[in-house]
Each structure stands twice: as structure tokens, then as C-alpha cells.
Image (cartoon, rainbow, N blue to C red):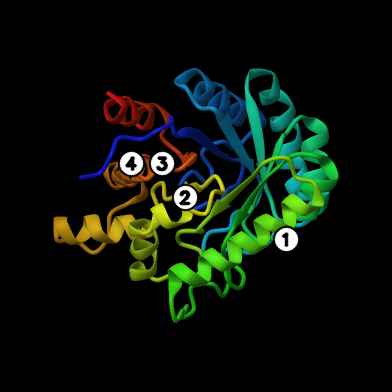
Amino acid sequence: MRQMPEHRTKIMGVVNTTPDSFSDGGSYPDHAGAVAAGRQMFRDGADIVDVGGESTRPGSDPVPVEVELARVVDVVAALTPHGRVSIDTTKAEVAHAAVAAGASIINDVAGSLGAVAGELGVGYVAMHSIGSPQTMQADPRYDDVVAEVLATVIGLAEAAKAAGAPEVWIDPGLGFGKTQRHNYTLIHHLAEFVATGWPVLVGASRKSFLGRVLADSDRVADVDFDDRLEGSLAVTAWSAMANIDVIRVHDVAPTIQTLQVIAA
């Protein structure tokens, strides 16, 4: 029988100021909309709001640094007075500008900015991925997905900590260079990530591997992004029972309610 969580899992809300992110792309076409969404997430109970200005969904194209800067810096600055803000970027220039604007965490899907986080003295999310958004889903293979992902993120975390990052989370990178089976295997083994002693962050919210399972149950080809909440909450519940530290979500209020029931 699974034990109850020993601590409260924190919530990182997602605000993507992009036209093409897989779930909320285009939802916030201007800074005012993005800021309003982030402030609502804080009111709903988010501990952190993660601001991103470049889509990293499979098949997405990179954007110029000046475009990403224009999308995120003012939003970060406007949200910082209301709560803790992280910047979702793979670019050092954007990380520097966002931290100057008030961000205190760098959420890095490429695993390349640990030294930047150390230099700036901010938190760092060391996430596993392979290849680029254009190539990462082209037949990803592992001999042992849990062992290989663990080794990679621990190496990234140790390097960031050695560089001076005061807080470091490890993230298995669900959906980034993983098949359906890889994703569910990693979720099943989240307790092994927690057992390393590193705080663990998980981002499964509304991802396609959830949609495919829900589609099978509904006997349809796929389930749209907006219909993946139940799957997202299932991963939230499993993650909380595994004592992960942070779960990254698009739907803050129902996630908070799920965690409240688990805690009760």
C-alpha cells in the first residue's frame, strides 16, 4: 500500500507567450493576457509561474533571441511582484534578461544552462531530452530508459550545483525524446528519481501520451489538448504519492484540489 506524501507537492503554473506551444499557444496574444493568466494562477494557489517564449513541442522551430526576449521579459517583470517566477528557455541571453527582470529559476529543457544558473545565483531545472524539437521524437531508443535518464539528469544537476546554483531540480523530461512506453515507464519509476535525494519536477500536463491513452478508452483517434485534464490529474496524484517536489501544470485550480484530497 502506498504511503501518504510526506510533504506538499508544489505547483508550477505554465504561461506560454507563444503562438505555437502545443497546449496554450496563442492563448495569450499580448503581454496583458499573459500577465492576467499568471496572476490568476498565483491567486489559484500556484507556488511558481513558468514563463516561456519559445515552443519546444515536437517539430517546433526555434525563434530568434530578440523575439523571445520581447515575448517574456515584460511578462516576467509584471508577475514577479505577485509570486515566484521561472523562465522557460534554452538561451543564455534570455535567461540573463529574465533573471534581471525578477525570475529566480531557469527551467532549461536543453540541459545547457546550469552554469548560467550558477553564475546568476538562481534555481535550475535540469531536464532530460535528446536531440532538438525537430528530431527528438524520431525513433528515440534506450537500453534502460530509467537508468539512462537518471544518469543524465543527475550529471546535469551535479554540474549546476557545482557551478553555484542554490537550488536544483531534476526532471525526467516526459515527452521529450520518449515513446509512449518510455513516458509511462518513467512515471512508474518516479520514486527512484526521488530516492536520489534531488528534488524532482515533473511536467506531464496535457501532453500527447496522455491523450493517446484517453483516446483508446474513448475509441477515437486522439483526444484534444482541452480534454486531457483527467489524465493530467492522474499523473499529479501518482507524482504526489511518490513525493515529488514540483508538478508543472496548465490547470492550477483543479491540480490544487487534487492535491488537497490526497493530503486529506
Residue marked by disc 2? 194
CA gap, disc 1 and disc 3: 27 Å
Residue found 14% across the figure and 61% down from its top: 219
What SS does tag 3 mark?
Answer: loop
Residue marked by disc 4? 241
Mark toward the start of the polypeptide (2 vs 4): 2
Mark toward the start of the polypeptide (2 vs 1): 1
Q: Quadrant of residue 187?
A: bottom left
Foreground of the two, 131 or 195: 195
What amino acid is found at the position of numbered circle 1 in the picture?
A: Ser
Foreground of the two, 29 or 258: 258
- Checking the image for residue 112, the label placed there is 1
What SS does tag 4 mark?
Answer: helix
What amino acid is found at the position of numbered circle 2 in the picture?
A: Val
Mark toward the start of the polypeptide (1 vs 3): 1
Residue marked by disc 3? 243
How many residues crowd around disc 3 within 10 Å: few (fewer than 14), some, or many (20 or more)? many
